Amino acid sequence: MAEAADFQGTGPSPARPRLRRTAALIAGVPLLAALLQLPAPQTANAAGQTSAKAASGSRTVAIALDSLSPAVPGEGDTLTVSGTVTNKGKQAITDAHVDLRLGPELTTRSEIDSVSQRTDYVPGTDGTEVDDAPDQEFAKLTPGVAQRFSISVPVDDLDLDGSGVYQLGVSLSGETSAQPWEQVLGIQRTFLPWQPDEPDTSTKTTVLWPLMAASHMTAETGSNEQQTPIFSDDDLAKEISAGGRLEQLVSLGSSLDVTWVIDPDLLATVDAMTRGYEIQAEGDTTVSGTHQAVARKWLAQLQRAVAGKEVVALPFGDPDLASLAHNGTNVPGSLSHLKAATDVAATTVRSVLHVTPSTDFAWPLNGAVDPSIVKVATSAGADKVIARSDSLEETGGLPYTPSAARPIGGGTTAVVADSRMSTAFQGDLTKASTTALAVQRFLAQSLALNLQTNKQRSIVVAPPRMPTASQARAMAKAVSALQDGTWTEAQDLTATAEAKPDPAATTKVPSRSSYPSSLRKHELPRATFDQIATTQEKLDHFKVILTDETRVVTPFGRAINREMSTSWRGRASEAAIFRAGVESYLDDLIGQVRLIDKSETKLSGRSATIPVTVQNNLVQGVDRLVLRLTSTSPTRLEIGGNTYSEVPVTVSGGHSQSVKFPTSANANGRVTVVAQLFTEDGQAYGTPVTFDVKVTEVTATVMLVIGGGVLLLVLAGFRMYTQRKRAAARRAAEDETDVPDDANDGDDESTGDPRNPEDPADRHTQESGARAGAGDPEQPSDPGPDTATESPDPSGTGERVDR
């Protein structure tokens, strides 16, 4: 007995006699009324698990179906169902066994929805045990301990009727000490699509395979000619590495017949990684990115995957069309950003993937539309809008799902995705049990849709915009099984959009008030578009002075597209940080072209020049700038003969240039002068520089003294010259008369000794001249740049000097 108590399971066993089960059912008759009066079923979570609070009755045991293979069985196949059972109650369960239950055929899509939501066991509704299927027994189920099971049965033993969707249940029956009779203590339901023969009509199904990511590239670039891009983080490298989300999407999608829907921003970002990139670190520092090889490998893998497949390019950055329609259209210029994002989309995809994409489609979030969204979506050139059937709902009471294409007026086609199939892969699909249920529900809805009518129809499946890796694996498994089935065939999105629409299908776009409030509360606010407009205005003002505006306009234009991205939904703080970073970096670049501050300048005279220096710390040169110097008191100080003077400015990258302005003073005193840069169209550029000019006028008395001193110098020089000329004449005369030496001994004082040529009179004259020169007024020295005493430019337009 002790050994039996420790025994956990015996594995599959042959079918047992029905006698004990029949007796158990008779014994359980008193419970039937109570079961039928149970409250409305509560929705189970994605895995079919129930909470401990609800762990009673048929919800005592949680059953997880990890695998149902094959997902779409055919004649002669063996169906295998495996998973786990977990006792969620407080008492041990004894004499337990797991059985398969085949329920009735589900004839409508609504019935599939109802079965998916039911959690309690309902006799009759949940079908009967499959007689020929072996069950798995457990001597004891300890509370909280999961036990595995696996049951296999030939499909032919299920005695299925014609084509259709059947409810397939896995139930666990057993006893507890409080209720010592056999009863169903847990059940999990799934669906078995059965289409053994070729159908009369097959559904043409378009599956969108989205390839998008959040923004990782900032507007900043390295301070070099190559403009090395700077990333906010290196998380994208994780997504494109082996096993990452984007790597999984490409790997899985490569083997499927799907339509790729791609955000060109993702391609541009990964392409930038292949050539080298930097990552923001602490402070203002950056570190070099190291995943160039990973980026090259992912792009090569994607190029192979999309070869021969249809590719739809969304506008660059995947702009949030609903936010733009509801909050951005009243902000001037907002729609122009959508047009720019659309124009660059095809070029980006062609250059990276070497395929020509379609840019005719717009895809609002979750396919939710209203007239304003349609208007915005088509304003940039798209004439097809991907909607969803839970937004553009049928109002005509059709007993079947119509084709996706709907003409909604103005030459626009709404391509309506099926909401049931499109939402089958939402939520947490990390567990095998949730994946198995999602796949079977998806296949069941597809088959049920096909069996509605013999009409040929085209259906679209639009899964989540950015599926997780686990969601992608579930999607791939379902789509692969669907494309292996017999009731559907793959079709490109363009062909679906061009298919003949069903005349009975609704074509009325829901009103703006019908837009889901759950989506509206996460929209980008108007403040987002106001800030974008401010950034664009600064960019337009800045680009006119650049010699190569593409180095700035292109990266900032793409950054503005990213500011409008749908990926910011639910991440308001991150979006605000990104926008602030773009504008701050633009302000920093604008500030690299500026005027150098000046201290007080002194003018000693009626005319002089004032130098003003323009500094350009950009890599590229700037031109089409005008430097204006203005006097705030022109009656005292004129600049270029007027209140102000202007000089065109051109400065090479990394250089400074000084511009000299001619001035004339009319009175002594201090005058405030303002230097300001302007663009050629007259818009002020940058911060003005204000400084004082102190004028010191030279008086008439000082000029007379200086003039008198100069005159004395001239007269003294003339006297020295005449005296020396007379002395030279006397010496020449003496040489000609040849007088003896002793005859001249008494003449030294009157005529001067030839051996001492310095005549006292001459010496007196020279000294007098020297004294006169030392008494002249001191000449002003050349002032430095700030004293500005250079002579004025005769042209009157100023002189530009490169430092």
Image (spheres, helix red, strand yellow):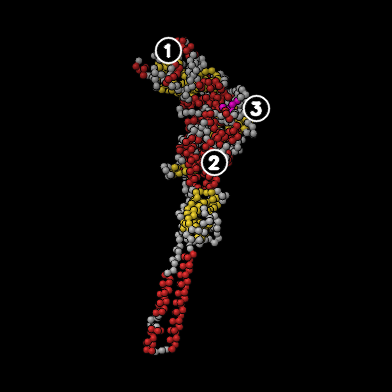
Q: Is residue 743 left or right of residue 714?
A: left
Per the image, the residue denoted by label 2 is 533
The residue at the point 48 percent across, 20 percent down is 42
Rendering coords of residue 242 (x, y %): 46, 36
Mark seen at residue 261? none
Three-letter residue code for mark 1: Trp
Rendering coords of residue 458 (x, y %): 60, 29
In magenta, the rendered stretch is 389-394
Three-letter residue code for mark 2: Ala
* Circle 2 SS class: helix
Per the image, the residue denoted by label 1 is 181
Tell whether label 2 touches label 3 (CB within 8 Å). no
How many angstroms separate mark 3 from mark 2 (CA)? 43 Å
Per the image, the residue denoted by label 3 is 503
* Among numbered discs 3 and 2, the one appearing first in the sequence: 3
- Based on the displayed image, in which of its 4 quarters is residue 61 positioned? top left
The residue at the point 44 percent across, 81 percent down is 727
Counting other residues with Cα less than 10 Å from the Cα at mark 2, is it few (<14), some (14-19), or many (20 or more)?
Answer: some
